[in-house]
Amino acid sequence: MSCTPKYYGGAGACKELPESIVGLMCLEKGHTAITKTNAKLNSGLTGLKSLIAPATIAAIKGFILDARNGAEPSGGENELTPSNVNYVQLTGVSAIVLDVYANMSWNDYKNYFAWQGTSMEIGLFDMNGDLWGTNANATNFTGFRGKFYLDKKIAPVGADKIKAYHFYVVFEDMTEWGANMEKLDTSYSAIQALEDINPVGVDISVKTAMASDGDVVVKAVLKNSSQPYAGFTTADEWDILSSELNVGCVLTVVSAANAALGEYTINIVDGAAATPTGDTVVQASKVSTTMTYLSQALTIGEYTA
């Protein structure tokens, strides 16, 4: 273990205990910078929404995990090794681990399997809504470097069902902790941070497969419900994320006459106005200054006669 300079400091008049962690903000490495000042403000939570719910899908840099079903810290313990004459030295510190039992549904949980093992910057919300990170930057908020893994198992029974959606979060850089931890005293509550930043989820599905002219009927309902969503009526509310074997794919909304039922007819053609010869992945979003609704990514199969 390396040594660092030692300085004396006075004792605080208040001996407060830290609040429990109730949520995580998971951001891509190299995300758009957000100042500590903007990360703390309650002005519509627009600072954090600029990363989590921006005006375009391409600008999304992360998501909020609600950990109110449980967050149990472990790891980080000192490894003390005695010599043959029983002289004890610090020889290692284990990674810090947070077992998070997310407050979500199965449809939400399964979306995160693709994120397993991805190195991210992770900020921690405590019960007061204050945001914890590391002081690596004097101006901008910096989360702790970490990654998570999920359980693939049958749901537990009884009271243990509260632990059904398990995120095993491992923090990778121990130099970010200890004296380098930093708490931002925010002006929003934990409930606002966990419930008001993420866009509302919408499930989209193919109702009628692609026709020879590229028309597809798509159904949209609020996630985890059968309630239709009527807000995806214009082409700028749909994004083509990828298209197999095609260049210059174009998506238009042919009809939103049945939007009240959550049904839309969209058209997908390539740059030559020909039916795509491969699968296309689309996603829909609704923006009102910031993003308010967001669908999952949907793969639409190519036309087959």
Image: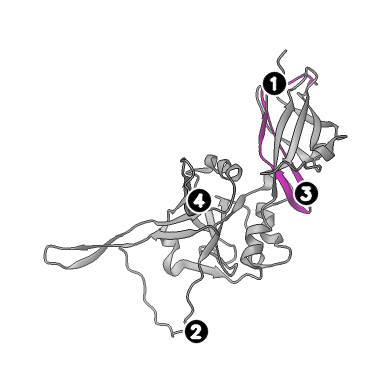
Label 1 secondary element? loop
Lateral position of residue 48 relative to residue 65, left or right: right
Query: Label 1, on which residue?
Result: 302
Residues packed near mark 4 inside 10 Å, few (<14), some (14 to 19) or many (20 plus): few
The amino acid on which the numbered mark 4 sits, given as a three-letter code, is: Lys
Mark 1 and mark 2 lie on one chain; the one further toward the N terminus is 2
Mark 1 and mark 3 lie on one chain; the one further toward the N terminus is 3
Query: Label 2, on which residue?
Result: 14
The amino acid on which the numbered mark 2 sits, given as a three-letter code, is: Cys
The amino acid on which the numbered mark 1 sits, given as a three-letter code, is: Glu
Q: Quadrant of residue 42?
A: bottom right
* Quadrant in the picture for the C terminus: top right
C-alpha separation, residue under disc 2 versus residue under disc 3: 44 Å
Do the CB atoms of the residues marked 4 and 3 lie less than 8 Å apart?
Answer: no
Magenta range? 272-299
Q: Which mark is residue 287?
A: 3
Q: Residue furthest top?
A: 305
Mark nearest the camera among 4 and 3 is: 4
- Asked whether residue 146 appears in the rendered view, the answer is no
Mark 4 and mark 3 lie on one chain; the one further toward the N terminus is 4
Would you say residue 283 sits in the magenta stretch?
yes
